Image (cartoon, helix red, strand yellow):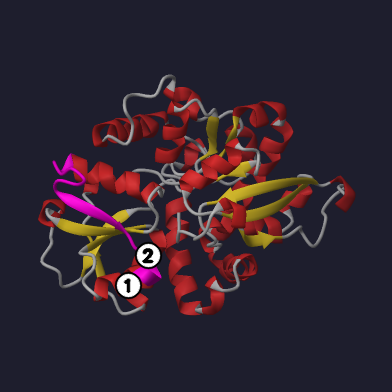
């Protein structure tokens, strides 16, 4: 997950609403099935596989037209999908499991950020070297219900620290406002998403990551949908994921770098205004979407990683207890079809 967007779902920010310019194969523009994807923020480079799939015509080749909308955090992504205001969303594992505990049958079907997107950042020259040094301090967060908050709470709990007693979360907004909060002394640390460290540094706030090593391997936001939608649309799910996998693999090739940046700029022109920052973000993102084990394929959900997330969330109090039927929170049903013919 990249920067968190602002606003309620009723005032959805349109991050991109594009059909492929060229329809490949036998599909015609009239035959395209429109799919709405809801993101927790308006950033595009973090979703480069999707924007590549739009720009290269991979979705169109699968008979799909993808419209992208952004809301304010993973919690609102889940709400939007559950309410039928989108077909597919990209929530973090914490909010997804919390929703399932409340009876919402939302299922992760494509593991997008295979490595941790989050960490706790402190000023480069700050005296804090480990999480316990933040006892009694204020930790900034982008949104109250973002996936990075669950992640940070889990880390701090593992360090023996409880919210309210040992530290305080303060909602300050994304990395731009966070820079100001740091400089004013309003926060001592920041629960950051992938983009934030780069943005903070480029805005004059050099930071260090104090995330413990054992938490750096936790996967991040992935593509999810309600189970009835998945069950009723297997062809859509297969085509959507196959296009994503192609887009992800496309972006890993150095010779395609410029095209990736161009497609992402179409998805969010404002994000692309700072070319140096855009390149820095992409270099970070492409490492986080690369599967930890390519032999399992693009999009594969690792059961043991879901178990680790559940254990961590229960320990931190983000979940009241283990999820009933954790294996139903994710599926690898379509992974083989997505990866057929792709280099492993």
Callout 1 environment at 10 Å: few (<14), some (14 to 19), or many (20+)? many
Location of the N terminus by quadrant is bottom left
Work out whether residue 166 or residue 40 is closer to the camera in this orientation and state it.
166
Tag 2 secondary structure: helix
* Mark closer to the observer (1, 2): 1
Residue pictured at 25% horizontal, 37% vertical: 316
**Residue 335 sits above or below residue 10 on the image:** above
Residue 284 x, y percent position in the rendering: 42, 62
Residue 285 x, y percent position in the rendering: 45, 59
Callout 2 environment at 10 Å: few (<14), some (14 to 19), or many (20+)? many
Q: Can residue 217 be seen by looking at this rendering?
A: no
What is the residue that sits farthest to the top in this orientation? 324
Residue 136 x, y percent position in the rendering: 12, 55
Tag 1 secondary structure: helix
Work out whether residue 67 or residue 213 is closer to the camera in this orientation and state it.
67
> In 3D space, how far apart are the residues under numbered discs 1 and 2 (Cα atoms)?
9 Å
Which label belongs to residue 196?
Answer: 2
**What span is colored magenta in the figure?**
158-177
Residue 205 x, y percent position in the rendering: 28, 75
Q: First in sequence: mark 1 or mark 2?
A: 1
Is 60 left, or right, of 342 in this rendering? Answer: right
Which label belongs to residue 179?
Answer: 1
Residue pictured at 24% horizontal, 58% vertical: 139
Work out whether residue 300 or residue 166 is closer to the camera in this orientation and state it.
166
**Residue 127 sits above or below residue 323 on the image:** below
**Residue 268 sits above or below residue 107 on the image:** below
Q: Residue 94: say if magenta.
A: no
């Amino acid at each position: 997950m990249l920067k968190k967007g602002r606003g309620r779902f009723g005032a959805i920010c349109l991050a991109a609403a594009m059909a492929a310019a060229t329809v490949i194969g036998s599909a015609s523009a009239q035959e395209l099935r429109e799919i709405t994807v809801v993101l927790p923020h308006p950033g595009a480079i973090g979703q480069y596989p999707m924007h590549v799939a739009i720009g290269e015509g991979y979705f169109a080749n699968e008979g799909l037209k993808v419209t992208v909308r952004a809301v304010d955090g993973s919690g609102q992504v889940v709400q939007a999908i559950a309410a039928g205001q989108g077909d597919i969303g990209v929530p973090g594992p914490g909010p997804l499991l919390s929703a399932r505990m409340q009876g919402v049958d939302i299922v992760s079907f494509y593991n997008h950020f295979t490595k941790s997107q989050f960490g706790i950042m402190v000023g480069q020259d700050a005296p804090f070297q480990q999480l316990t040094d933040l006892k009694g301090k204020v930790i900034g967060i982008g949104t109250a219900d973002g996936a990075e908050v669950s992640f940070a709470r889990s880390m701090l709990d593992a360090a023996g620290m409880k919210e309210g007693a040992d530290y305080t979360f303060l909602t300050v907004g994304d990395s731009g406002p966070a820079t100001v909060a740091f400089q004013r002394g309003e926060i001592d640390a920041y629960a950051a998403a992938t983009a934030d460290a780069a943005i903070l540094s480029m805005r004059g706030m050099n930071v260090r990551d104090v995330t413990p090593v054992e938490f750096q391997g936790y996967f991040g936001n992935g593509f999810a949908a309600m189970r009835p939608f998945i069950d009723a649309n297997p062809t859509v799910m297969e085509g959507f994921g196959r296009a994503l996998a192609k887009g992800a693999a496309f972006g890993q090739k150095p010779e395609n770098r410029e095209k990736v940046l161009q497609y992402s700029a179409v998805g969010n022109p404002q994000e692309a205004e700072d070319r140096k920052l855009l390149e820095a973000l992409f270099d970070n993102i492409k490492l986080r979407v690369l599967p930890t084990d390519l032999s399992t394929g693009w999009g594969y959900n690792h059961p043991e990683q879901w178990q680790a997330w559940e254990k961590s969330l229960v320990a931190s109090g983000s979940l009241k207890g283990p999820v009933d039927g954790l294996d139903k929170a994710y599926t690898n049903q379509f992974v083989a079809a997505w990866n057929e013919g792709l280099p492993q």
